[in-house]
Amino acid sequence: MKEFICNIPKAELHVHIEGTLEPELMFAIAERNKIRLPYKSEEDVRKAYKFRDLQSFLEIYYKGTHVLLKERDFYEITWNYLKKASSQNIRHTEMFFDPQAHTSRGMQFEVIFMGILDAMKEGAEKLGISSKLIMCFQRCMSVESAMETLLLSLPYKEWIIGVGLDSSEIGYPPRKFVSVFERARKEGFLTVAHAGEEGPPDYIWQALNELKVVRIDHGIACVKDILLVNKMKTEKIPLTICPLSNVKLHIFDSLADHNLKQMLDMGLTVTINSDDPAYFGGYLNENFLAIQEFLHLDHNDIYQLIKNSFQATFLTRNEKAILLKELDGFMLKRSHPIPEKAFS
Ligand code: HPA
Ligand code: ZN
């Protein structure tokens, strides 16, 4: 099973590029930028990665971003992630970035963006990995700040596939950002939102009905509301589930308690993702391996999760068809019959 999971072609749809900043790179960039870190060693950093909840994680996560000052820094984190992703047989990835975490420290939008874009182009050329970029607004910041950020991004919109909503959830309902998402949709951005990670099902309803998002990030709270589950099933709305993140942030006590298998069996379009792999103890393969072990997923479950993620990408029909064909080819070569319901 381990070899099967590591080798099967896959996609990732929920990863924050700033959340891929490994302690080693954090130290190297801090030294280059002459920034003093509040940690003595890389080991010290890892020891600090013990979180009570989403908020306590975000405080450390945003502090980590303070070392990022130059275009080269953004290039390096993105390039390192893409190399890692490619080594895990990720064929396509859709990455979040948090511009407000940097513009609020005085950085230029263009500097952040160009560093990331250069790495994405190089990833396609040298590694054959395709990637797309989703710009997140921090829901704990003002609507005005989100709108300003949206306007800053417009010159680069052909390279940014969509916008999303992240950061602290409870007390910050998606509804607050209706005007920003409306403008984003008018500008041609696709829309997603973190909802129902720590927050209630109502935040998922708001994201769907009021922000008109086409994918829900996390969304694990949906199972508390059968009407919502039915809507998401009928409309095949994908959910980007991040198992290791959910345990590190104490949404579930253990992976054995995770509701992924329940959602999969309900027929929801669930996918597996790493969220902030440098902080949560693993990249995509580690997430698959851990959840497979704890929930006893079989080959068909893994196949369905990956098929869901290919279908949920923001790629074109043709691009999706190429990925799906590679996936089925992989299954047949391994003599794993393709499950019938998966042909739908
Ligand atoms: N949740 C919300 N906001 C975030 C996260 C997350 O897991 N990671 C980075 N920003
Ligand atoms: Zn996230």
Image: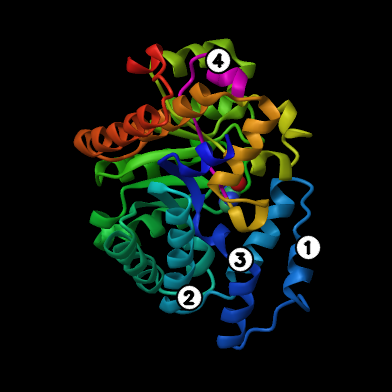
Name the secondary structure under disc 1.
helix
Between marks 1 and 4, how big is the CA–CA gap? 37 Å
In this figure, which residue is indicated by the disc labeled 2? Answer: 73
Amino acid bearing label 3: Glu
User: Where is residue 86 drawn, in percent x and y?
Assistant: 42, 55
Picture quadrant of residue 224:
top right
Q: Taking 342 as reference, is 62 above or below it? A: below
Residue at image location 61% in from the left, 66% down from the top: 22
Between marks 4 and 3, how big is the CA–CA gap? 35 Å
Residue 111, label in figure: none
- Tell me, yes or no, whether the highlighted magenta stretch contains residue 256: no
Look at the numbered disc 1 and say if its residue's Cβ is closer than 8 Å to ligand 1.
Answer: no
User: Where is residue 340 drawn, in percent x and y?
Assistant: 38, 12
Between marks 3 and 1, how big is the CA–CA gap? 13 Å
Residue at image location 46% in from the left, 19% down from the top: 232
In this figure, which residue is indicated by the disc labeled 3? Answer: 22
Residue at image location 31% in from the left, 66% down from the top: 122
- Residue 28 lies left or right of residue 145; in this view the side is right
What segment is highlighted magenta in the picture? 261-275
